Image (tube, rainbow, N blue to C red):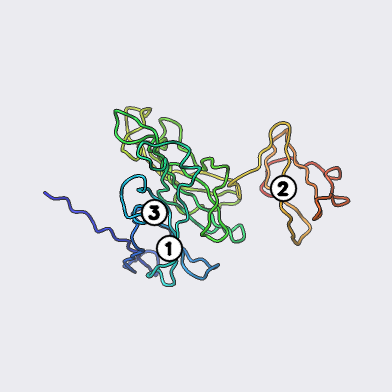
Amino acid sequence: QAKVYPPREFHMHSSPDGLRWKLFARLNPGRGGWDTQSVAFWDPNIERYALYTRYWMSHRHGTAKAPDNFRTVRRLESDDLKSWDKQSIVMQPDEADRTLHPTPPGQPPVDYYGADVFRYAEADRAYIMLAQAYWHWKPRAPRKGLGPAGFDVRLAVSRDGVKFRRAGGRKPFMPMGPAGRFDSKFVWAMPDPVRRGDELWIYYVGSNRDHDSYIDDAAAEGKHLTGISRAVLRLDGFVSADADYAGGEITTPLISFSGKRLELNVDTSGAGSVVVELLDENDKPIPGFSKDDATPANGNSVRMP
């Protein structure tokens, strides 16, 4: 008997009430693949729709062989959700990724398998990307393929939705879970964070089975575990400036604002404190607002005065 596979098409459906759905369009964003989570939304900054989906770089190079066969994240635009143009690659392995680990086939040690991209409503013209990084660089004979064959989530930010900059010192934004847990090999961020008060809830898919279908060696009785879970982030807490026990200092770029109140998103715990000094355009303390005039702030709040 022959196996019958569904056509590799990208279908979009619409509904007047969220209950009854009908086919809206069979999309054709062009060659490159779109068989992984795709994200589309209306972008008021360009007054068009934006679509983020997978793109195999082998289609650009015309070969499916190493070292050109790897996944990236692309962006397209549309006026009607049917015809798409202005394709660009917005996330791919860069030089720092490529030099992290040598790989036998010469491919990058990481693919960007997909991404959740969204406009961050709490900031002006801010786009957040939670990129799904697929790591494959470690030979693991006698098993096939390259380990760890796992997924974690990387953070990138943009002001236009096209040019993204990696953030957080390239640390994993959502790392794989501890050995033996349901998310020890696979962490995949789902669209989009949900704000609940002063928290952002990020739902994600986890699995203890890697991309090559190997189950975590630490899994109890070798069982495959998977599920949807929730990660909780403090509001605006995507990155932070951290000081050690001896303290530290950070100077912002020159800013202008209206209002009479400065608020900090800060966590000092018991022993820590924050002191604020206001500087003029020449980096000189403004009289009455130097660090010697300040009252140390102590506590844990997303809006500490």
Whether pointer 1 and pointer 2 mark residues with C-beta atoms closer than 8 Å, the reply is no
| Residue 304 marker | 2
Q: Earlier in the sequence, mark 1 or mark 3?
A: 3
Q: Regarding mark 3 in the picture, which secondary structure is present there?
A: loop
Mark 1: amino acid: Gln
Residue under label 1: 87
* Residue drawn at x 66%, y 39% as measured from the top left: 242
Task: Calculate the distance from the C-alpha at mark 1 to the C-alpha at mark 2.
Answer: 43 Å
Q: CA distance from mark 1 to mark 3?
A: 17 Å
Along the polypeptide, which appears first: circle 3 or circle 2? 3
Mark 3 neighbour class, 10 Å CA radius: few under 14, some 14 to 19, many 20 or more: some
Q: 72 or 207: which is nearer to us? A: 72
Label 2: element kind: strand
Going by the numbered disc 2, the residue's amino acid type is: Met
Residue tagged 3: 37
Point out residue 60 in the picture as x, y percentages from the top left corner.
Answer: 37, 56
Disc 3 residue type (three-letter): Gln
- Residue visible at 38% across and 55% down in the picture: 55
Looking at the image, residue 26 lies above or below residue 153? below
